[in-house]
Image (tube, coloured by chain):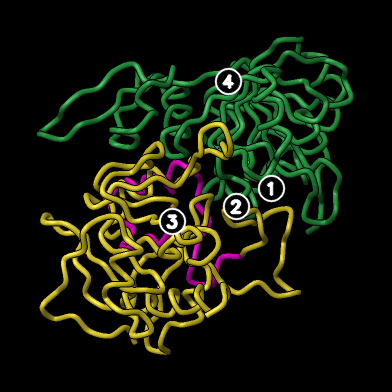
Chain colours: A green, B yellow
Amino acid sequence: MAKIISVEEAIDMIPDGASIMIGGFMGCGNPHKLVDALAKSGKGNFTLFCNDGAMPVGPCGEEYYGVAKLIHNKQIKKMYATHVGLNPEIAEQSNSGELELILTPQGSYVEMIRAGGAGLGAVITPTGVGTIVEDYEHVIGRMEIEGKTYLIERPYRADFALIAGYKIDKAGNIWYKGTTRCFSVAMATAADIVIAEADNLVEIGEIEPEDVVTPGVYVKYIVEGGIENG
Amino acid sequence: MDKEEIKSFIAKRVAKEMHDGDVVNLGIGLPTLIPQFLPPDIHVIIQVENGVIGTGTVTDENIIPHHAVDSSGVPTVAAPHGCYIDSNTSFSLIRGGHVDCTVLGSLEVDEKGSLANWIIPGKKVPGMGGAMDLVVGAKKVIVAMEHTNKGKPKILKKCTLPLTAVEAVDLIVTEMGVMEITPEGILLTEYNPEFTLEQIQAATEAQLIISPNLKPMV
């Protein structure tokens, strides 16, 4: 059963050099309290799995929105992403060699994470055939099935997944608001330790079993308090 | 036409490719102008790859900037008939052929329908995001873009930039014309009467095949 801990206790668990998946898209759905605390921790050398680098300015004027703080602080040595165009610091750090950037098509990326969490050995997809993606490190082969060419891509897993839910009950069951479920649903399955940040921590029973999106069995720790409104 | 007029002109023409009930994914920039030009009897279901099927209108009342954004990171909202989905579901929809049409801009398109729109090596490396999956999976791929890059042809015999996908494009719409990708090459089916056919060909590196049913763009 998921255990409720403080943000500090959560960050204490994450060592230098850890691989970390962080849910969300362009900062929306990042677990902001956990990310802020990680940014202040002084730790680094992380391998980050996050769709993007969020944005230098958030939707309500926030400075270094979401994971952009980790990039700005140069805490990331390697990043697996699909699109980093809205955070120019990633291109700068990638060009200077401070950050190794691995780009993957978004549909393949999330499916590779799902494979990592679902015990599958690979993803087989038509996306990227005939492009430079074929030469990327995550592509482990090519195959023909019924006359169509596919790329074989390895699964992704990480030491930690940090995700955010709008309502999380004390058993760790998660209900997401809006588009924030995006990558978190897959990431919750593909890390050794999943820490979920609750916008609203609720009693068991307050999320109907039919409405649970991420089952609590995937969630090891819950921390309280994200963005409550908006 | 100035740049804004060109964009609206192209978007207006692309709007005619939409059918009532189509599931449509629109790329950033010009394609987002298309919905305003749809006739009143054509309703499309706009899919946003980071997690919405059926977007609605954002208002002061329903905006949730920290919980619902579109693929540009701008606030969006699901319409009452719509829904929010996770990324696996979204890309299953896309790759699985459940998106009727995707419209996106491009840096280059060639006569085989291959396109390049995600990287300029050494200059811009934003990443492909969902574009590679979209052009591989959508039933119809429409490139909506300016015909040239400041006079330099973008419709080529063969793309020079790293590809987004091989032989994926069905239709190109520019301010100069409407072009179908066919096994024989690029078929010009409509032209903007502001330009002569010679001017359109001169702005195009690939050889255009002029349709016997060539019509003016309206």
Q: Residue drawn at (20%, 23%), measured in percent from left and top?
A: A143
What kind of residue is marked 4?
Ala
**Chain name for mark 3:** B
Tag 2 and tag 3 share a subunit: no
Q: Is residue A3 visible?
A: yes
**Up/down of A36 relative to B129, above or below:** above
Q: Which element is circle 3 on?
A: strand
Q: Which mark is residue B23?
A: none
Residue B17: x %, y % from top left: 31, 74
Q: Are marks 2 and 1 in contact (CB under 8 Å)?
A: yes
Q: In the image, which residues are magenta? A: B77-106
- Disc 3 crowd rating (10 Å Cα; few below 14, some 14-19, many 20+) is few
Of badges 3 and 4, the one in the foreground is: 3
- Look at mark 1 in the image and give the residue it sits on: A28
Q: Are marks 1 and 4 in contact (CB under 8 Å)?
A: no
Q: How many marks?
A: 4
| Cα distance between the residues tagged 2 and 3 | 39 Å
Of badges 1 and 3, the one in the foreground is: 3
In the drawing, does residue B100 fall left or right of residue B46?
left
- Look at mark 4 in the image and give the residue it sits on: A191
**Up/down of A157 relative to A17, above or below:** below
